[in-house]
Amino acid sequence: MSRLGNFPVAQVLEMGVIELQERVRMTERAVQAFEELKHSFEPTAVLDELDRRGITVVTLADGEYPGRLKSVPDPPPALFVDGELQSPQTPAVALVGSRKASVSGLDTARSLGRALAERGVCVVSGLALGVDAAAHEGALEAGGFTVGVLGCGIDVVYPRSNRRLFEEVRASGALVSEYHLGEAPLAWRFPARNRIIAGLCETVVVVEAPEKSGVLITARHALDAGADVWAVPGPPGLQECRGSNRLIADGAGCLWDIPEFVDSVAPEPVGKVPAEEARLEASVPAGLPEGEAAALAGVGFEPTAVDTVAGRSGLRMQELLSALALLELKGYVSRDTSGSFVRRAGG
Amino acid sequence: MPVEVEVDVSPGLPGFSIVGLPDAAVQEARERVKVAISNSGYKFPTRKVIVNLAPAHLRKEGAAFDLPIALAVLAVSGHIPAESLKDAGIVGELSLDGGLRGVRGALCVAEGARREGLRCLVLPEINANEAASIGGVKVFGIRTLREAVDFLGGQSEVSQTVPQENPSSESVETLEDFADVAGQSFARRALEVAAAGGHNVVMSGPPGSGKTMLARRMPGILPPLTLDESIEVTKVHSAAGEGNGALIRTRPFRAPHHTISTSGLAGGGSNPRPGEVSLAHHGVLFLDEFPEFNRATLEVLRQPLEDGHVTISRVAATLSYPARVTLVCSMNPCPCGYAGDKRRTCRCSAGQIERYQSRISGPLLDRIDLFVDVPRLTRQELREGRDAEPSSVIRERVAAARDIQTRRQGVPNSALAGRRLREACKLREDSEALLGAAIDRMGLTGRSHDRVLRVARTIADLGGEDDIAVENLAEALNYRRSSFLDR
């Protein structure tokens, strides 16, 4: 669509073949494909399918289309939404970062997600591995609302190992994509989706990014859209955070204290504050014996070493080990080839 | 094996020969003995002297025969009454000035003397303490050939050696302590279970995760050596020429480098010396970087792990050294070391990893009951690690568990198999059900099934329980191998 030059979409749809070739400068093949699409496109069938899956469409023309998103370069003409976007009054913060973040980066992302969700702030991220997943997890742990923006069709789970997270986000938040059902996660779609992330929020936090990271593009889009950009400081020289550190040097907000930051985004709790019980329920299914519940609470959606779970759950090693094996047999967690445990949704 | 030294002096051209399959060192005794005798002020007989070391078919090795040969010659030439040498055990190497040098294996010699009922043992002073510690035989330490002659001739007194406690000998308390290890409670628990049941362990983890540090502390949580065990250990070390003569009271920790040869590991060489596996007898044999060891070399561990001793064959005799060890192995999860690590990415292909992991296979794998992953912990996690228990506390629990096993079946749980295993590990219904679920959902093989049972039995023993509870089984399941190869 971007190659349509500056012609409004409606006009292009009216053009004949010759016009398309001369004015819009489409190649013959493109024209053919375009014509085919024009004629085979059946809006009703598509809308029915979407309806069946519970997916809504928000187009540029609609009132619900997020305002800030309109001002990003080449705004998506339509957004597919699985779930419900919160009202524009709800503050939304994007947490983005690299897929191969350091352990402390992941922890920070998780803590940020949790703290923001506790305050009722909507947490937006890309459902990718690494920082994105940690941010979503943190928000889910706090029983909050989180939105995942995809670089593929709204029904496509990518990466496959994130399937559980995908389901959880869809259940307690929303999935958003500008790509039609079944569209594959092609590489160029991810930087593109970053502009949507930026456009959905007033504040974007880069938790950790190396130099030359796609995450920095998101920061760029955010600035263009007039959003606030923050970054979490990291140790000087550490490869994983050179990009995020540079952002701070170039003027981004320095997120050195999580409570302070959350206060600046939302001084008062927004809307329904998730109740204690609701929060626990979101993380641990009811009906588990105490020991196993405590153990399960310590296992994350990313591989967690046994000692880490011990620290989080507070259990004695003996009890923890037997709880972990029972959880594994019941299907709540699984063990990977390096002996770390990972949570699984469902049982 | 007692060797009798016979000397015959006959008329004929002056000569001095030694027969009885002497090796080079023993042959050289001729020079040493001759010179030592004359430098001590005696005259060497100028006749034909033949020394026979009986029995004739056994190869004689080493320089310990110097003194008995010298004394025998002196007896023949009348300097010592022959009866004084009757039933006396004598060993020692002579230096050219008539002084005595220490020999290897004094403790073993003393034990042999005791066994043969010899009336006394005369040996270099420097070996006297070690020899005397065995008890049951009178030990006399001497410094020179002259002194020996005078003593045996009744012209002077040499006081019998009384074994001294060597004040610098290690006690259990000086061993490395688990209290110094921060965090890693999973690995600590695993080692405690391993120690309690005599199980062998493999630790897998990236470089720097602390595997070696943990392994070094394992001897400290094993129950203290009994006197008999102490003697065995000291004998082996003595035969290897190690040790300072005092009784060894701490369990040995041997960590051979992975370039070690077969004879270095199992023992052997032209003068059969005990190998690392024997030097680790009643202690811990630590194979660091386990997949780097030559597979053929590791084959020699099969016998000791199975029978508890190592047999070395020589032309005329077979030697058997004890080798009942606890095996602790460490390895990286993959060739580059960082598979599964959170901070570093692994550079290995799946094929490389598989080949690397399959190096730990076959009979050795069968003997290992516990597999532990030792990850690198963050500094924060290390700080948060529970206050570390000192080894002494862990040791008590381990000793108590071992007692239970001795009373119940006489051997540690790791030795249980087949019918004995099933008898000792009768499961209640709920435990049976759990094991069944594990076979279905975790893909537990027949081998791992037995391993899990053995380990669960040890865990129950650690808790002082008669029955194996569901929790014990569940915990045991955590120690199964987590690679994608056959578990």
Image (cartoon, rainbow, N blue to C red):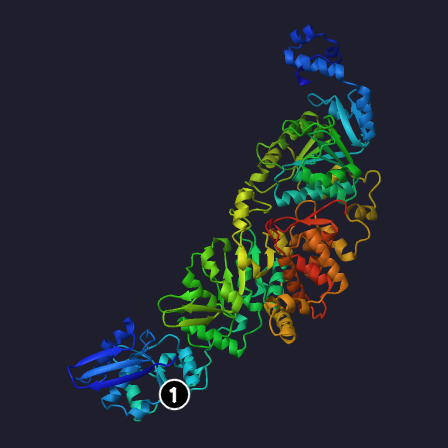
Residue sitting at x 46%, y 84% = B135
User: Which amino acid, mark 1?
Assistant: Cys
Q: Is residue B1 above or below residue A269?
A: below
- Residue B1 occupies quadrant: bottom left
Q: Is residue B213 left or right of residue B462?
A: left
Residue A87, image x, y percentages? 82, 31
Residue denoted by label 1: B120
Q: Is residue B96 visible?
A: no
Mark 1: few/some/many CA within 10 Å (<14, 14-19, 20+): many
Residue B227, image x, y percentages? 52, 79
Q: Secondary structure at mark 1?
A: strand
- Residue B10 occupies quadrant: bottom left
Residue B12, image x, y percentages? 15, 84
Q: Chain of mark 1?
A: B
Q: Is residue B172 above or below residue A51?
A: below
Q: Is residue B17 visible?
A: yes
Total numbered circles: 1
Q: Is residue B388 above or below residue A74?
A: below
Residue B348, image x, y percentages? 53, 43
* Of residues B30 and A170, the one drawn nearer to the viewer in this rendering: B30
- Most distant residue in the left direction: B13
Residue sitting at x 27%, y 83% = B70
* Of residues B194 and A190, the one drawn nearer to the viewer in this rendering: B194
Quadrant showing the N terminus of chain A:
top right
- Residue B50 occupies quadrant: bottom left
